[in-house]
Amino acid sequence: MSLDTHITGLQRDAMPSSPPLLQTIRQHPVLGLLGLIFAVQLIRSVLRRLEIRRFKRAHGCKEPPAFPQREYIFGYDAWKRLSAERAARRILPAAMQRSQTLGRTNSIVFMGQKYIVTSDEDNIRAAYSVQSADYGIDCRLSYMKPLLGEGIFTLEGPKWQHSRAMIRPAFTRAQLSELSAIETHVQHLINCIPDGSTVDMLPLLFNMALDNGTEFLLGTSVGVQNSPRDSEAWRFSDAWDYAGEAMQRQSELGMWGSLMWDPKYNASIKVVHRFIDSLVADTLRHGPKPGRYNLLGELVRDLQDPLRLRGELLCVLLAARDTTSSFLATTFYYLARHPQVWQKLQAEVDALEGQIPDYEILKSMKYMKAVLNESLRLVPPVPRNIRVARHDATLPRGGGPDRKSPVFVPKGTTVVFPICATHREPTIWGSDSEEFRPERWLDEKFRPIWAFIPFGGGHRICVGQQNAMTVATYALTRLLQTFGRIEAKDSMPWEENLSAVQTNMHGCKIAMWRK
Ligand code: HEM
């Protein structure tokens, strides 16, 4: 053996052989790669756990009660239970019951995602207002965008601010006091109500709100109240209804929503878009229509992008139309079942001696306001709202055995606010919280601000709140000036019908007698 060979042999012996792990990776690269990924994930998960532990300790967070489930990965039991509740049309009553039995703030795993559900007014205030920087609306973008596109409801940050700045002036007092358009649509409604025989007010109110809403938005009413069933106006109305209902179905599938296959939904979206696009194109070509104020006319002064214009209009239409009609239908539902409230309201309206009310008169009607508030409390048209944590965040209350500690909300977690439960919470509203009793609002000192939020709150509070109250007060006053008696014509209990808003699935069947 030469000296060279001997030295090389010694060097090889002296060289440390590669560790078994590296040898395995060399021999089985795929297995090795998987192992590496696993190891990285494990380390990340450990670091994340440590980060969460530190965060929870720093903020004094404790766990809220959890919905009892056999497994917490997919949440099969929750899925089964919620499906049964949906089939029985009891999603909202069940949410209210859970708030009272499980805890006003609780957690649930549903279709592989963890949700925090809270009806606690302190938590609502935090997410909507004082900690609003921690919570966004990404959770609604995926299911709202196909129909609505980009508009005030689906935007965040500077684009949303711009949107809000453009839309808000539409609701100035001067615009709100322009009541002559509402009068036209209310008179069409009155003409559709037979004297003393059964009528379902719900579709009539939807039509009135669509006519009034489109006039306010586009300067031209679709005129569905006066159009034959096979008209363009009805095609738009039907497509709008179907799209709203399908959008709601999609929202309930959570992160799986994009897998929903519904060709009728896509066709309805096309009908809606075509209708709005032609009006937008017309306004962009010829400028705003002269005469009565309308939102499209105002928006084109600032915005020339037809898609954005369509998005803004559809967002406001969604916000305005179904909410206002659901609100009025609920009010009629209760009035028909509470003759003494109807009488008191009649007395307030009779004091006007048949005069057509102006904005100042509408504002001064105290009992009317109490009735409308009570209707919004018991059946808020938007019964739930959601926010998603932009980063690790907290809610101030609901954790620990006494439910008083802050709750940890991991980044990306959806927080659901069952407003309907907050509005009926006995500890706030008293033991008669389930009853329709407008008198509770006559006590000026009783103002449960964050426990009464039919119009949301904080920086995204409804811009159309005054408009909704004005339209509802005006329509109700004119109807009470026309009809002296009301009766319920349906013995069925209230059953929920959830689309973009909640309504009674049995409609609102009543009879009214002319004075
Ligand atoms: C009873 C009737 C109404 C109810 C219950 C209602 C309810 C709400 C609620 C709860 C929100 C907040 C959503 C959130 O926090 O994300 C909202 C936002 C909004 N509402 Fe209303 N609304 C009503 C009528 C109207 C009307 C008549 C209009 C317009 C004519 C309107 C326009 C809007 C707009 C544009 C927003 C979005 C505000 C933003 O994101 O900055 N709403 N509404």
Image (cartoon, rainbow, N blue to C red):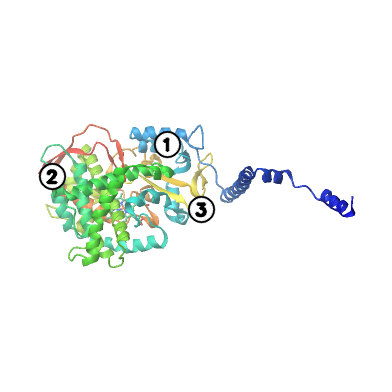
Disc count in the image?
A: 3
Q: Amino acid at mark 2?
A: Cys
- The quadrant the C terminus occupies is top left
Q: Is residue 196 above or below residue 22?
A: above
Q: Secondary structure at mark 1?
A: helix
- For the residue carrying disc 2, how many other residues have a C-alpha within 10 Å: few (<14), some (14-19), or many (20+)? some
Residue bearing mark 3: 391
Asked if residue 116 lies left or right of residue 324, the reply is right
Q: CA distance from mark 3 to mark 1?
A: 27 Å
Q: Secondary structure at mark 3?
A: loop
Q: Position of residue 177 (x, y in %)?
A: 21, 60
Q: Position of residue 143 (x, y in %)?
A: 37, 48
Asked if residue 154 lies left or right of residue 51, the reply is left
Do the CB atoms of the residues marked 3 and 2 lie less than 8 Å apart?
A: no
Residue bearing mark 2: 192
Q: Secondary structure at mark 2?
A: helix
Q: CA distance from mark 1 to mark 2?
A: 42 Å
First in residue order: circle 1 vs circle 2? 1
